[in-house]
């Protein structure tokens, strides 16, 4: 039987980071992962450049059944802390959009940095190595692995979420949580394209490839989500950052409400009617992408070639209203294959927010995406992985 002070299952973002810190604090740590390659999600993230944090991270960018849970860990390990670590390792980065930080070269640099941190903490790294069973008794945990049984007083579950099963995602962490009596908030794909009924979508298919900034919202009251982001029309529906963001808030059966133009458009068109003899299509194209203007007039059955003075006020109002208050009903999401993150996960109400420790089973911890804390698009999910890992490792 091997003995370790701590065993971390899952060598992804949270597991690597936690193992490195714990090892450097003097613990004898084993890091295990069943996949062939280490940290595949870091590798593919951010288009290969890893959007590793967001400078403007606050608890407001996270969803959870227990929204206050993430505050403590996020406050004690900030984006500035991770930036300082990257700088110590000489990893160059840049800000792309709204506080989102990416590696200049490659996400491999983040993986190499985390592996170097583990090496300097003397972490034992068994990969690929499956875990077949976990038992808990008065002396701690017995973990059956493909390389033999391991004993440890501290078990850290860092097995991530369900997205992209083909690179190693499993529900192992959720099953283990249930095995030890923990509740699980029903997992669902988030940061995921939404799908539409093909027949209902057919009239909009002509817009495929068009991208524009919109306001998008769904839900009501505390469940309401609202973003101003870029929307992408596709042959099958809608995608782009606006839809990925809103997908985390979307509930089946709820419509999306989109403003493709602002509410002042009707008034601007009324003013133009008094001063210009432009055709309606040309006038609208001053306010919207040309392809959207012409397609939309067709959909609204309005005469693109008629001069502005001949367009009735009520038609201008109908046109402005249809663009400022467009409502569409998704039929579902594109599922775990396309999702970037899992919403839901191990219920935080039975975890300590300072240490990520289980309140039910002494020595058991859950960190990273397996926990019911889900960030918006933009580097927030990695920041949660770093922050929850640091909070856990410092208390091991
Ligand atoms: C395509 C894509 C792009 C993304 N881009 C970004 C981005 O740019 N910025 C951002 O903030 N977030 C991004 N994310 C989300 C981010 O990758 C995750 O939130 C983050 O990796 C979670 O870290 P984690 O350590 O909890 O889980 P993971 O990094 O997923 O690591 C979990 C590890 O556990 C292992 N594991 C699973 N089951 C078992 C088992 N039964 N036994 C042993 N090991 C197991 C897996 O092999 C994996 O190595 C992206 C996700 C995807 C899918």
Image: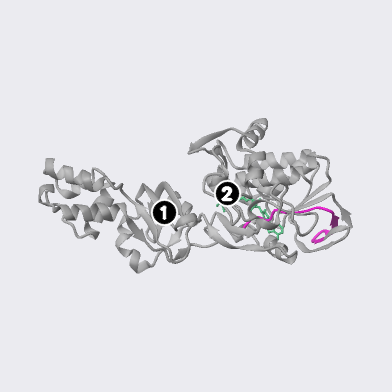
For the point 78% across and 59% down, the residue is: 361
Magenta-highlighted residues: 143-161
Q: Residues within 10 Å of mark 2 (few under 14, many from 20)?
A: some
Q: Tell me: 257 left or right of 281.
A: right
Q: Which of the pair 266/172 is nearer the observer?
A: 266
Identity of the residue drawn at 71% across and 44% down? 391
Q: How far from the left and from the top, in percent, is residue 250?
A: 47, 59
The residue where tag 2 is placed is 44
Instruction: Give the colouring mode of the picture.
Output: one colour
Q: CA distance from mark 2 to mark 1?
A: 29 Å
Return the residue nearer the eye: 9 or 127.
Answer: 9
Q: Is residue 379 magenta?
A: no
In the displayed structure image, the side of residue 5 where residue 244 appears, left or right: left
For label 1, the SS is strand
Residue 313 in the image, given as x and y percentages of width and height: 16, 52
Q: Residue shown at 84%/54% (left/top)? A: 153
* Above or below 258: residue 264: above
Q: Is mark 2 within 8 Å of ligand 1?
A: yes
Which residue in the protein does label 1 denote? Answer: 217
Mark 1 and ligand 1: say if the CB distance to the nearest ligand atom is below 8 Å: no
Q: Element under label 2?
A: helix
Residue at image coords 70%, 54% = 351
Q: Mark 2 vs mark 1: which is more N-terminal?
A: 2
């Amino acid at each position: 039987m091997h003995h370790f002070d701590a065993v971390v299952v899952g060598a992804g973002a949270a597991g690597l980071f936690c193992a490195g810190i714990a090892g450097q604090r003097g613990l004898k740590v084993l890091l295990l992962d069943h996949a062939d390659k280490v940290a595949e999600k870091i590798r593919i993230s951010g288009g290969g450049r890893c959007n590793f944090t967001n400078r403007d991270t606050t608890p407001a960018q996270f969803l959870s059944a227990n929204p206050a849970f993430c505050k403590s860990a996020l406050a004690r390990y900030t984006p500035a802390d991770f930036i300082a670590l990257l700088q110590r390792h000489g990893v160059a980065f840049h800000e792309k959009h709204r506080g989102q930080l990416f590696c200049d070269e490659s996400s491999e640099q983040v993986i190499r940095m985390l592996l170097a941190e583990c090496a300097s903490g003397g972490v034992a790294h068994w990969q690929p190595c499956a875990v077949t069973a976990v038992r808990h008794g008065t002396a701690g945990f017995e973990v059956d692995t493909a390389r033999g049984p391991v004993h440890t007083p501290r078990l850290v579950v860092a097995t991530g979420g369900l997205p992209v099963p083909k690179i190693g995602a499993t529900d192992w962490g959720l099953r283990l949580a249930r095995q030890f009596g923990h509740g699980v908030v029903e997992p669902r794909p988030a940061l995921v394209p939404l799908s539409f009924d093909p027949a209902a979508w057919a009239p909009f298919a002509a817009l495929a490839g068009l991208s524009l900034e919109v306001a998008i919202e769904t839900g009501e009251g505390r469940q309401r989500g609202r973003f101003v982001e870029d929307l992408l029309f596709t042959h099958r529906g809608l995608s782009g950052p606006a839809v990925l963001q809103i997908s985390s808030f979307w509930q089946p059966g709820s419509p999306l409400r989109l403003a493709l133009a602002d509410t002042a458009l009707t008034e601007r068109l009324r003013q133009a009617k008094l001063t210009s003899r432009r055709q309606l299509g040309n006038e609208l194209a001053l306010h919207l992408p040309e392809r959207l203007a012409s397609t939309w007039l067709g959909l609204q059955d309005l005469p693109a070639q008629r001069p502005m003075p001949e367009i009735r006020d009520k038609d201008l109002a109908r046109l402005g209203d249809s663009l400022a208050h467009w409502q569409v009903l998704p039929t579902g999401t594109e599922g775990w294959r396309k999702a970037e993150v899992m919403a839901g996960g191990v219920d935080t109400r039975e975890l300590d927010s300072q240490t990520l420790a289980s309140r039910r089973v002494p020595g058991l911890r859950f960190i990273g995406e397996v926990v019911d804390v889900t960030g918006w698009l933009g580097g927030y999910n990695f920041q949660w992985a770093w922050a929850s890992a640091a909070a856990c490792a410092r208390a091991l």
